[in-house]
Image (cartoon, grey):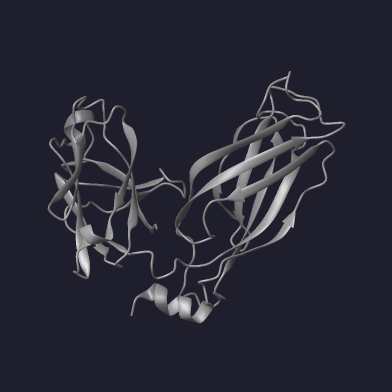
Amino acid sequence: MNKRILALVMAIAFIFVSCGKKKVSNPGIDMNVSFSAPFYNHTLTDVTYQWDLKDKVIPYSPDYKVYVHFWWGAKKIMLAQDDHDLPGDIESWKKGGKFTYTHKNIFIPDFIDEFDPDFSGKEEVTFTVGLYKPGSKESKIPLFQKKLEFTPLPPDYPEITFGEGWYPEEKTGLGIRDSWRWTSQEASAIIENVQKNLRLYLFAGVDKSVYQDQKVIVKLGDKVLEEFVPEFGHFERIYDLKKEDMGDAEEIKLTVGTDKTWIPSKARGGNDNREVGVQVFMLYLKPVE
């Protein structure tokens, strides 16, 4: 049985919950934050920030940065962050000032162990926003806090199984580019056909110091979705896959390939004698209408 279905039946995880919203007391700033997606394990979400500056707003400083953290309290692990610059400038940072902006594709890693005996069907994550000055001893200024309850992915999110042509996963952390798999000349992944329209996200890279003109080829079954030479080393691609393109088979093959491979030991020295092609950070699928 699909392991997600088993856990979801136990946890009734079709429902996502957010609770414990708390606007931290801070004179002069009213903040709201919203998310584009349910709170699922191993997912992408857009985060929209809304600032409303009130009377006695703290003075503007270009040294301020905004910290945005997703804290998994049970393990004391920061799952994700979206730190960024303070919005506005010294002219607009005053009573009545309003700022709204969205940061796309914030990555929540695969952190839920559905078969942990202590797993209750959900995991609580604390989302916090505030101000700080890097390198300063000044205290952080909290602005917003919200308790989020994450559940496993529901069964209409298709599983992806890595097939032939991949090297083992390498990992340095939890961020979207902190884990990856190299392809050989061509690598395939098997997609569970859930008979829905899907959106495919491919976050990947090529080494421009080795080849400037290395081509990437993405195929669904025998159909070429795209052939391109990335403008930069890291790239993101989004493909809308129609249900009818998936056919009636229970599974369909997705292929990521390249026209050129290289051997790290020959390019840079060392003892890595693999023949590598594309560095894939993330393959992600979600149902769409």
Q: Is residue 162 visible?
A: no
Residue 125: x percent and y percent? Answer: 61, 59
Screen quadrant of the N terminus: bottom left
How many labels, in total? 0
- Seen at 54% across and 60% down, the residue is 39
Residue 115: x percent and y percent? Answer: 45, 75
* Residue extending furthest toward the right: 56
The part of the image, by quadrant, that contains residue 189 is bottom left
Q: Is residue 268 visible?
A: yes
* Residue extending furthest toward the top: 91
The part of the image, by quadrant, that contains residue 130 is top right
In the image, residue 102 above or below residue 110: above
Of 13 and 80, which appears nearest the observer? 13
Screen quadrant of the C terminus: bottom left
Residue 33: x percent and y percent? Answer: 65, 47
- Seen at 21% across and 24% down, the residue is 212
Residue 214: x percent and y percent? Answer: 18, 31
Q: Is 33 on the left-hand or right-hand side of 119?
A: right
In the image, residue 241 above or below residue 234: below
- Seen at 71% across and 32% down, the residue is 98
- Seen at 30% across and 45% down, the residue is 280
In the image, residue 276 above or below residue 126: above
Of 76 and 121, which appears nearest the observer? 121
Q: Is 244 on the left-hand or right-hand side of 197?
A: left
In the image, residue 130 above or below residue 169: above
Q: Is 15 on the left-hand or right-hand side of 263?
A: right
Of 220 and 274, which appears nearest the observer? 220
